[in-house]
Image (cartoon, rainbow, N blue to C red):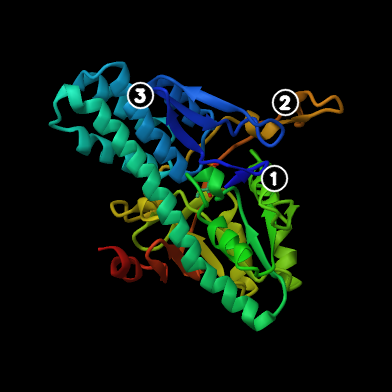
Amino acid sequence: MRIEGKEYRTIWFENNIVKIIDQTKLPHQFVIKELKTINDAINAIKIMEVRGAPLIGGTAAYGLALAVQENNDPEFIKKSAKKLIQSRPTAINLKWAVDRMIKKLTGINSDQLLSIALNEAKEICDEDEKFCENIGINGLKVIEEIYNKKKDTVNILTHCNAGWLATINWGTATSPIYHAHKKGIPVHVWVDETRPRNQGANLTSYELNEEEIPNTIIADNTGGILMQRGEVDMCIVGTDRTLSNGDVCNKIGTYLKALAAHDNNVPFYVALPSSTIDWDIKDAKDIPIEERNSEELSHVEGIDESNEVKKVLIYPKKSKAKNLAFDVTPAKYVTGLITERGITVASFDGLKKLFK
Ligand code: MRU
């Protein structure tokens, strides 16, 4: 998608270097960062220069290719894979991508390892782009149906950033929105700010602005009253891990939005590529929920009048804070899962029909 009119993907390989858009600098600065080593890739995932489940997967794939470029000894590659998987625990795409890379590299002659690793990393990214485009084509039907009934702007609420910046391109939750906009359907997006890291305000609103899609940032607690007032036609969110029973793990606060949507008969859709399905974990209690540094809550970053980036403390100095990064929305609150193969009910049978 576009930034200042120029088309980008979120990650690419050029002159033996992986390039990413540094998301910790957005929306105030647009910085392309170079990842040259496996440790650069691990660090980028940890400190969220790249984030969003599919992009974490793409970065892990390229990270492993960087590891091969550094040292193609099988032990080093194996250790690198392990470190990558540990870099962020919740998004299943990370492990999925690393496992796929390792499978591809197993039994390959050392002189071919690098080219195969780079090809596979590119393949993982190209595939994600295609899948996200298809999510958009499938999800467009839902927006179109609402528009055909309403004959007026479709108001869509989204949480966190499941936009193109969280994937390779198109996004998951935003892809149906981009497709609707391209088709001339009037859409307006309620963007949950998404404390504490403000991925909604800093990234979703930013990318929608760049594509000229009308959007309004709201505080995370505003969605409920908007739904009660009939000002939300549907919700679409992304996911970091969807269990085979349809339970959806996503950014903290998603569950509360789903409850409000359920109470107000607002359809609540989750958009995901199949790489986000966890076929192994059966019980949501077993999903590793990332707990991040409480400084993300107690401090906020922004620019001052002279455009300088500043970080300030907003909590009482003696207060403790707890920063859980994800929650789980039970399948019963999910109207449908929008995937690259179609839309299904959030259930084992629904997912199995599409994917197994
Ligand atoms: O902590 P983040 O910013 O990586 O969390 C991202 C989300 O929760 C997204 O909704 C999810 O990864 C889906 S991205 C298409």
Report, in whole angstroms, how far the alpha carbon at label 3 lies from the one at label 2: 43 Å
Question: Is 320 above or below relative to 206?
Answer: above
Residue at 59% x, 34% y is 23
Q: Secondary structure at mark 3?
A: helix
Residue at 60% x, 49% y is 160
Q: Secondary structure at mark 2?
A: loop
Under mark 1, the amino acid is: Ala
Single out the mark in the foreground, 1 or 2: 1
Mark 2 within 8 Å of ligand 1, using the beta carbon: no
State which tag comes first along the sequence, 3 or 2: 3
Q: Is residue 303 left or right of residue 118?
A: right
Report, in whole angstroms, how far the alpha carbon at label 1 lies from the one at label 3: 32 Å
Residue 29: x, y in percent?
69, 30
Residue 64: x, y in percent?
33, 28
Report, in whole angstroms, how far the alpha carbon at label 1 lies from the one at label 2: 28 Å
Q: Tell me if I can see residue 12 in this picture.
A: yes
Question: Is 236 above or below relative to 210?
Answer: below
Residue that numbered label 3 is attached to: 66
Under mark 3, the amino acid is: Leu
Q: Quadrant of residue 27?
A: top right
Under mark 2, the amino acid is: Lys
Residue that numbered label 1 is attached to: 201
